[in-house]
Amino acid sequence: MRSITLVLAPVIFILTAYLGLAQDTAVQSGRSSNVQTYTPSKLLGPGQWDIKFFNSLYTQTRQTEGGSKAVDIPRQTFFTNTTEVYTGISATSRINVGLVFQVRANTYNGAKAWRAFNFEDNQVDARSGLTTLAPSIRIQPFANVGNFSFTSSLFFPVFEDVPNAPYLDKRSLFWETKFFYDRTFGANKWQLFTEVDLGFNFGEKRANANPLTENIGERFANQSMVVPLSVFLSYFPSFRSTVFVSGQQSFFIGYDNPDATGNNFSQNYTALGLGGKYQLTDALNIELSYNNFVRGSNFQGLGETFSLGLRVLF
C-alpha cells in the first residue's frame, strides 16, 4: 500500500497542476512548444520547475544463455516508476538542481505481466517498494553551446536488504552522468538527439556478502561500469507533437581484478524503439514509447518495455 501511495502521489500532484494551469491551455499556433524546446539538453531558467513522472513496464520470456543464444524462461516483469523534480537556480539558465526517486515492482515464475501493478512484496515471487533516492545536478558547461548539457546523479539504495528474496534493485551506490546533445534541422521539423551515459556501481562485492543476512543477487553489479549509447530521431507533425524512433547500445563492464573476489561480469544489449509526445497544455506533456531488446549477451533479457510519461514545466 505504501508503494501504491508513492506512485499515485506524483500523479495527483501533476493532475492538480494541470487543473490549476487550465487557463493556460490554449497553445497558440506558430509558437514553439515544450515538446520541441525542452529536450534533456535544454536547462531551466531561474524559478522554473520541471517535474517528470515516468513509468516503464519491462517484461521478458526469453534471455540469452552465457553467450548470445536465446533461451525460453518463465515470464519475469519489472515495473519502474521514476519521478524527477528539477528547478533552475542560475540567472544564466546553466545550472539546475533536483531530486530523483524510484519505485519498483517485480514479479517472477511466470506471473502475468499486469500482476506487477499489485505491488506485492511476498519475498517469494514478487517484490516492490521505494528503492532509490538521488540528488541530481544539471549543467550547461559552454555558454555558446546551448544544446549540450550533462546531468549527474548519485543514487542511494533505501530498500530493505532481504536475504534469499527475489531481486528488487541493485544494492549499489550508483553514480550516473548523462551527456546530452541535440540538433534541430529541416525547417524545425526534424531533431536528432544523442545521449551518452556513464554509470558506476559501488558497494560490497558479491563474493564478500553474507548470504544469511544479505541478498547476494542484488550485489551482482557492484564494482562495475555501465555505458549506454542512445540516439533518437524525431519528427514534428505539428508544433505541439512529435514522433520518434530510437536505438540504444549498452555495455555493462565489471572492472574487478579477475583474481579478486569481485564481480568480473560483463553484459551488453541492443534495443530499438519508437514513441511519441504530445503537449496537452502550456504546462503538461504526455509521452508514450515502446522498446524491444533485439539482441544481447551473457544472461541478458530479450524482452519489451512499454512506457508512459507525464511532464509538467512551469
Image: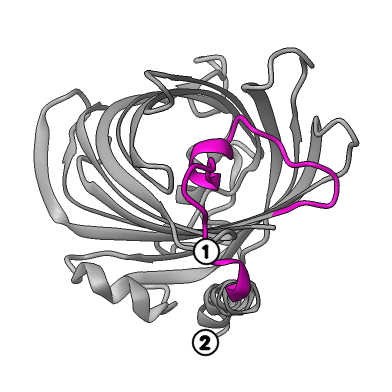
Q: Earlier in the sequence, mark 2 or mark 1?
A: 2
**Residue appearing at x 67%, y 24% in the figure:** 149
Q: Quadrant of residue 181?
A: top right
What is the number of the mark on residue 1?
2
Give the magenta part as a residue range: 22-49
Q: Can residue 121 be spotted in the picture?
A: yes
* Residue type beneath disc 2: Met
Single out the mark in the foreground, 2 or 1: 1
Secondary structure under badge 1? Answer: loop
Seen in the picture, residue 159 relative to 287 is either above or below; the reply is below
Residue type at the position of mark 1: Ala
**Mark 2 nearby-residue class (10 Å; few <14, some 14–19, many ≥20):** few
**Does the magenta run of residues contain 33?**
yes
Left or right: 114 as drawn, with respect to 161: left
Report the residue marked by disc 1: 26
Left or right: residue 89 versus residue 168 is right
- Residue 144 in percent (x, y) is at 75, 12
Q: CA distance from mark 2 to mark 1?
A: 38 Å
- Magenta stretch holds residue 26: yes
